[in-house]
Image: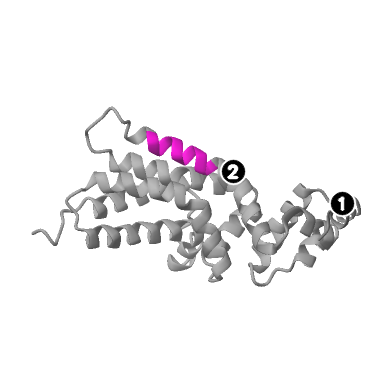
Amino acid sequence: MTQTKRKDAKNGSNASETAFLDAAELIFSERGYDGTSMRAIANEANGNVGALHYYFGSKEALIKKTIERRLRPAQEKCIERLEACWPNSTKEAPDIGSILRAYIKPIVDLSIDVNPEFDTLMRRMLNDPSTQVQTMFHQLLDETTFLFIRLLKKCNPSLAKEEFYWRLNSIMGSTNYMFSNRSDLIQLSSGQFSPSDTEQGVEELIYNISTMYMAPSRISE
């Protein structure tokens, strides 16, 4: 698109960048990535497709920006807390509970504090099979995840490489399940349990992960 056309698209729209992002949050949460079109988002925002392309360029860039605007503050808080778990001045192993709490809590708080559409969007995108969405999540979360992994290794250095990564897989799986499938607990408990107390859920998750991860190496025995 030429610069002139970009200006025309922007000036011809009655929707702001924020309005497009709000609309994208809603439509992506309802239809998923593959089921969403740029036109549907433009219509929801009462704007035009040209303006939407002017702001974001592509659907892939739009979904990344939609998630990033909410996720970035939580990530920054997560990184700050993770770095505080193991200051450079100490030689002692970091506390596993503190690391897990620093990694998990900001994202859980985000799912509570923001609007329901974003919570639904995050749960849907975490389970989205499309390559674009999975690549986008890796790009957004790599900095936080690699710091988390580096600290995690220091908590139980006796683990063999294979053990560490299988246990890491269990951590990621149970954490993602808590974010994206909490409502399943209602069905699994036949309606006798409601996962509304996320504080207790986080502490139970941390306790169980800590116990699993800090168990002695089975290979070295």
Residue 157 shown left or right of residue 41 in the figure: left
For mark 1, what is the residue? 7
Residues 148 and 207: in front is 148
Mark 2 and mark 1 residues within 8 Å of each other at the beta carbon: no
Residue at 73% x, 59% y is 57
State the mark number for residue 113: 2
Residue 41 shown left or right of residue 9 in the figure: left
Residues 71 and 188: in front is 71
Circle 2: element type: helix
Please state the total of marks drawn on the protein image: 2
Q: Magenta residues?
A: 74-83
State the mark number for residue 169: none
The picture places residue 25, in percent across and down from the top left corner, at 68, 56
Which residue is outermost to the top?
89
Residues 60 and 195: in front is 60
Q: Give the overall secondary structure of the magenta segment.
A: helix
Can see residue 69?
yes
Quarter of the figure that contains the N terminus = bottom right
Q: Earlier in the sequence, mark 2 or mark 1?
A: 1
- Amino acid type of disc 2? Asp
Q: Quadrant of residue 56?
A: bottom right
The picture places residue 163, in percent across and down from the top left corner, at 23, 60
Compared to residue 81, the image places residue 172 above or below, namely below
- Amino acid type of disc 1? Lys
As for residue 93 lying within the magenta part, the answer is no
Scheme by which the image is coloured: one colour
